Amino acid sequence: MNSTLEIAFGLLGGLAVFIFGMNMMSECLQKAAGEKMRSILALLTKNPVMGVLAGALTTAVLQSSSATTVMAIGFVSAGLMNLPQAISIIIGANIGTTMTAQIIAFNISDYIYAIIFIGFIVAFVCKSERIKNIGQTVFAFGLLFLGIETMGSVMKPLATSPVFTDLIARVSDVPILGVAVGTLMTLVVQSSSATIAVLQNFASQPAADGVSSVIGLAGAIPILLGDNIGTTITALLASIGQTKDAKRTAVAHCVFNISGTCLFIWFIDPYARFVQMISPKGPEVEVISRQIANAHTIFNCVMTVIWVPLIWLMVKIVMRIIPDGRKMVHDPMEPLYLDEKLIGQPSAALQLVVREVLHCSEVVSAMLKDVRKVVAKEDKGLLQKVNENGNVVRNLSTRTTQYLADLFASGNLNEEQASQSSGILYILGDIDRMGGLCCDLAGGLKEKLDKKYKYSKDAMKDLEKSLILIESMYTEAMKALVEGDLEHAGQIAKKREKVIELDISMRKAHMSRVSKGKCDAKLTVPFNTLLYNIDRMGNSCVNIADAIEGVRPLT
């Protein structure tokens, strides 16, 4: 094979193995971490410093700043996070992503195959899902270094190529050209971790003297700065079609990295000397990988120190770049929170599902109130509203169910998350059923008003009492579900008994009125249908309360 082609395919193949290993490690770490990711993200509600910490920890787990940034954009778009919080998360993500370069800087080439073998054996033999995920993480970690080793071996001939060394010399002498090269590399590969790994590997190739690096730290830093700019394209792509605040979050990511590049590019040589001073000493080709990792970490830490107190200024900048326009009216038939881009991050996606389920339950609560008002005031105008909301609930339930199905199909859920998802599906089914029963009740009440059925005042009062009780049960069931209050959930069953007692009492009273000629016998079937639907509502409320034991609190 032509030597040029051999180098090209070796480099691309090694890069492919590296990216595959990194993505696999990210997925397995997410599964192993499980709902701890949710706890990490909860830190962001405290203050900007905690937001930075949450972003750094999340990225350290996901091994991808792009994944954390996409997650933050999704949360902003869903209204779960405000712009300053999202900016602090993204700033932290830039620190977290430097962990990959630090790990790569370790020279473990002699142990790569041992790591791959141990990871494979643990994943293949162990039955526990958590241990299996840890084994797959170790296996992926080995693949990551195998990719680096492959790239390193095929790059060696490049170090002695006069054409290539001349090209590198030009890049080293013109920092802006190095920035452009790094940006372009990351735009193509869509992973700054991958391009920085390539940079570390290439910089570790010896020059003609066999001791110094073929590119040197001062030549590598501009490419490193370009890598940081290039990674922002993922955030910009993720923000397409999202809310203005989501777009601003993506722009904030760009501002952070571009401002850092504009600042550091003027101090390349002194910065390189500072990094060399604090890094391990030794022949340049042996320590430059760690120097690049340190330069990456210091760059992001310095920019974090600069920007955290100035988050208010960052908000103003992105607000100026993307100003407020005419507010879009949300289509009630569309989910408020679900984001397809977060399917790959199950902890975050499940948070959105929970919010959507609670949103759906709020629509059902409004329907219950409207149905009760129709009974109390015979307000025919509310019936159409009930039916419209019924369509909304049906559509939201269908879309949420499909989103959960996609989550299952992604293969990213661990056992705990799969169990949580199943419990949510069960509850969503009863919420959807409550919406359908409200529509059935509305249909029965419309028939009463259209055909001018004359139920007695006592019958209508008892119907209203039943609906007040159902409304109370449903509100308490959802509250208990949100808070995980098992003791409170047990009280709902007692209210169910009252509904049954009231149902029996209403049926007896109706038959008594019929026997005395106070009520038309033809009204028995439609009246019993109304009672039957109310009875089924009571069952659904109890079902929701019973499900609390198997589902983590929806908070």
Image (spheres, grey):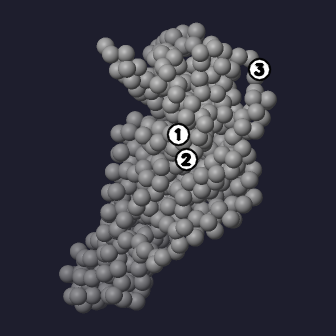
| Residue type (three-letter) at the residue carrying disc 1 | Gly
Q: Which residue is mark 1?
A: 182
Number of residues whose C-alpha sits closer than 10 Å to that of mark 3, classed few (under 14), some (14–19) or many (20 or more) = few
Q: Nearer the viewer, residue 259 or 104?
A: 259
Point out the frontmost of discs 1 and 2: 1
Residue 17 visible at all: no
Number of residues whose C-alpha sits closer than 10 Å to that of mark 2, classed few (under 14), some (14–19) or many (20 or more) = many
Number of residues whose C-alpha sits closer than 10 Å to that of mark 1, classed few (under 14), some (14–19) or many (20 or more) = many
x and y percentages locating residue 422 in the rendered image: 42, 44
Question: Residue at 38% across / 75% down in the picture?
Answer: 506
In the picture shown, does residue 521 fall above or below 493?
below
| Residue type (three-letter) at the residue carrying disc 2 | Ile
SS at mark 2 in the image: helix
Q: CA distance from mark 3 to mark 1?
A: 26 Å
Contact? badges 1 and 2 (CB < 8 Å): yes
x and y percentages locating residue 130 in the rendered image: 53, 27
Q: Nearer the viewer, residue 459 or 391?
A: 391
SS at mark 3 in the image: loop
Q: Which residue is mark 2?
A: 229
Question: Residue at 45% across / 27% down in the picture?
Answer: 15
